[in-house]
Image (cartoon, rainbow, N blue to C red):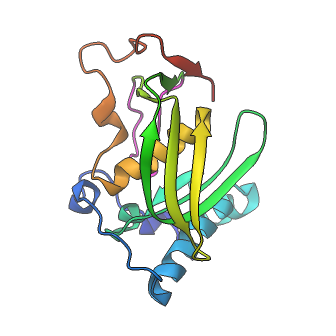
Amino acid sequence: MLTAKDIIKEGHPTLRVVASDVSLPPSQEDSITLQKMMEYLQNSQNPDISQQYNLRPGVGLAAPQINVPKKMIAIHIRDESGTLHSYALFNPRIVSHSVEKSFLTSGEGCLSVDRDVPGLVPRYARVTVKATTLQGEEIKLRLKGLVAIVFQHEIDHLNGVMFYDHINQDNPFQPPEGAIPIER
């Protein structure tokens, strides 16, 4: 089981590395790592388990955050309508995106960042992601809203990008022009 101690923090060099593709079919080790990442998110959202193991609640986790520089992400989140989106993916990539932007009105946070970073993070309002599931199935996801933002945040980790790299340093609370505000 992954715990909070397994998550590396900002400043660790692995968080700035471009992750490697996972060879498919994945090795047993890679599959187990990805399963453990998903279990962490599920456990972190369970009030009893998160308290027992001192887990910070998370909705997404990328393998570089546990010091594994490989293209693997886990996402476990309910969208604005309450629908659960739960994915454990190898080699996710954004294949297309909208021109239109969106942002979380509350800003973004990260399991690898133990401080509040004030500011709005502009993201694409809609993205299409291609990836391979834990079961080896090729999938194509069309995402919007909160789920699209979480996917972009995690895929950024695979490219060595932190969410605060996107914040406008001169005016951190300036909403991107024409962008859709998303409440969280």
Quadrant holding the N terminus: bottom right
Examine the rendered structure and indicate whether residue 46 appears above or below residue 1: above
> Could you tell whether 149 is left or right of 48 in the image?
left
Q: Quadrant of residue 38?
A: bottom right
| Residue 55 visible in the shown view | no
Query: Residue drawn 23% across and 59% down?
Result: 17
Q: Quadrant of residue 153?
A: top left
| Residue 108 visible in the shown view | yes
Query: Residue drawn 47% across and 83% down?
Result: 25
Is residue 91 within the magenta segment? no
Examine the rendered structure and indicate whether residue 19 appears above or below residue 35: above
Examine the rendered structure and indicate whether residue 23 appears above or below residue 181: below
Is residue 111 within the magenta segment? yes
Q: Position of residue 111 (x, y in %)?
A: 46, 51
Would you say the magenta stretch is mainly helix, strand or loop? loop
Q: Nearer the viewer, residue 65 or 20?
A: 20
Query: Residue drawn 29% across and 64% down?
Result: 19
Q: Nearer the viewer, residue 43 or 63?
A: 63
Q: Position of residue 101 (x, y in %)?
A: 46, 23
Query: Residue drawn 29% across and 69% down?
Result: 20
Examine the rendered structure and indicate whether residue 161 appears above or below residue 132: above
Q: Position of residue 48 (x, y in %)?
A: 75, 60
Magenta extent: 106-118
Quadrant holding the C terminus: top right
Q: Position of residue 82 (x, y in %)?
A: 78, 40
**Outermost residue toward the right in this view:** 82
Q: How many marks?
A: 0
